[in-house]
Image: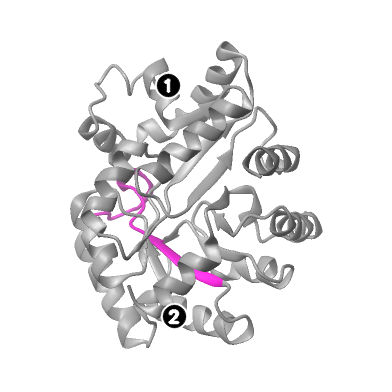
Amino acid sequence: MNDATAALKESVGQYGVWSAQLRADTPAGAAERADAVAELERLGFGAVWLGGNSSARDAAPLVAASSRVVVGTSIQSVWEHEASAAAASFAELEVAHPGRFVLGLGVSHGPRVAGYGRPYAKMTGYLDELDRAGMRPGHRVLAALGPRMLELARDRAAGAIPYLVTPEHTARARERLGEGPLLAPEFKVVLDTDPSRARATARAFLARYLELPNYTRNFLSLGFTEDDVTGGGSDRLIDAVFAWGDEDTVRERIAAFHDAGADHVALQVVEDAPAGTLPREGWRRLAALLA
């Protein structure tokens, strides 16, 4: 493990927050987003991961609004951002706030990208360009699910940030990565003890992801069936990729990822709320149960 990866592991700590709502770069809501990330830092989270196709531009105001928390993209699409521009944006933010921004890269999904093809080759070419632009591997992580991309995360980045996975996937990923690289899976949490209501909230949220073959193939590789990945997801699948229930249950579900080899877990609070709403009370409850 090199010094940059070791420093990243120490900075992000055991827990972070994953949020698409914090990604927005429009003026409306900017003050609330800045206040929210400062509060997340006070609550003890080590990292904030910006969902969607995010970039250094999205991260910059959040980095400026806080003093310690690491802000990462989860992910920046290699199809929609030029590598040279990504390297330049990283360098600018690194000069202003050393060690506070990490570039999370991903190949996105075929249904969302025109001309999608050969994602592994696209990622390797992108990393080549970052290398030529002077960006070191220790400042980037990859959204890796399958074996080849995990090996790329091991060999040419600081580690992996898998999305929509289980502890079983985390154990496989740790074996593929080895002990050195950062392994920081995302995990969804519904803070509700009612089974029917919690699963309904989770199922409504999960449905969009089950339209994406990268995720469904990964679920099938983990032993789920075609029946599990249709109709918004079976109860079995919902219960595997979401934590819900009382505080002890949620705490145990999160701990299972660490037990399986995760260094850090990026926690996404899922609520039945209008789009764009920051789940600030949920973040507070989550911090309290992890304290």
Q: Nearer the viewer, residue 42 or 19?
A: 42
Classify mark 2: helix, strand or loop: helix
Classify mark 1: helix, strand or loop: loop
Q: Looking at the image, do the residues carrying marks 2 and 1 touch, with CB atoms under 8 Å apart?
A: no
| As drawn, 17 above or below 62 | above
The residue drawn where x is 58% and y is 28% is: 248
Magenta stretch contains residue 103: yes
Residue 280 percent across, percent down from the top left: 74, 43
Could you tell me the amino acid type at mark 1?
Answer: Gly
Residue at numbered disc 1: 232
Q: CA distance from mark 2 to mark 1?
A: 38 Å
The local crowd at label 1, few if under 14, some if 14 to 19, many if 20 or more residues have their Cα within 10 Å, is many
Quadrant containing the C terminus in the rendered view: top right
Could you tell me the amino acid type at mark 2?
Answer: Ala
Magenta stretch contains residue 9: no
Give the image's coloring scheme: one colour
Q: Nearer the viewer, residue 179 or 70?
A: 179
Q: Nearer the viewer, residue 59 or 47?
A: 47
Can you see residue 118? no
The residue drawn where x is 42% and y is 48% is: 185
Residue at numbered disc 2: 87
Quadrant hosting residue 217: top left
The residue drawn where x is 55% and y is 51% is: 15
Q: Residues in magenta?
A: 101-117
Residue 266 percent across, percent down from the top left: 51, 49
| As drawn, 116 above or below 247 | below
Q: Earlier in the sequence, mark 2 or mark 1?
A: 2
